[in-house]
Image: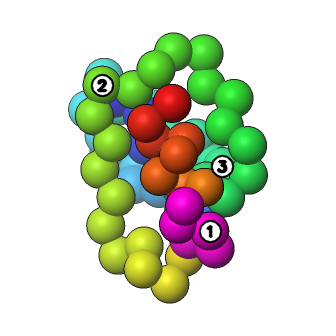
């Protein structure tokens, strides 16, 4: 499980299968494998270009 956040503040205790990465989802995505599931919440004011964001999700 991969958690992406712009902020470097993450919880100390997380499950062993969880990894956090600091990244800006408005920038180009350079992940090595495709995602099976993407969950976003409270992003309505954070995404600058929704069309581009949705394109990256479905690529």
Q: Circle 3: is it few (<14), some (14-19), or many (20+) Cα within 10 Å?
A: some
Where residue 14 appears, as percent x and y from the top left, is 31, 40
Task: Tell me where the magenta segment starts and ends, as one range.
Answer: 47-51
Residue 59 visible within the image: yes
Give the residue at mark 1: 49
- The disc at residue 23 is 3
Q: Determine whether the residue tagged by mark 2 lies in a helix, strand or loop.
A: loop
Residue 8 visible within the image: no
Q: Residue at x 60, y 55 (%)?
A: 52
Colouring chosen for the image of the structure: rainbow
Q: Is residue 48 magenta?
A: yes
Q: Quadrant of residue 42?
A: bottom left
Q: Quadrant of the N terminus?
A: top left
Magenta: main secondary structure equals loop
Q: Is residue 43 left or right of residue 1?
A: right
Q: Does the CB distance between marks 1 and 2 fall below 8 Å?
A: no
In the image, 40 versus 12, the foreground residue is: 40
Q: Does the CB distance between marks 1 and 3 fall below 8 Å?
A: no
Viewer-side label of 1, 3 = 1
Give the residue at mark 2: 36
Where residue 2 appears, as percent x and y from the top left, is 42, 33
In three-dimensional space, the C-alpha distance between marks 1 and 2, rounded to whole angstroms, equals: 22 Å
Where residue 46 appears, as percent x and y from the top left, is 54, 76
Q: Residue at x 47, y 52 (%)?
A: 54
């Amino acid at each position: 499980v991969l958690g992406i956040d712009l902020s470097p503040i993450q919880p100390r205790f997380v499950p062993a299968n969880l990894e956090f990465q600091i990244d800006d989802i408005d920038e180009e995505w350079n992940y090595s494998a495709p995602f099976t599931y993407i969950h976003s919440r409270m992003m309505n004011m954070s995404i600058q270009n929704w069309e581009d964001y949705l394109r990256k999700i479905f690529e």
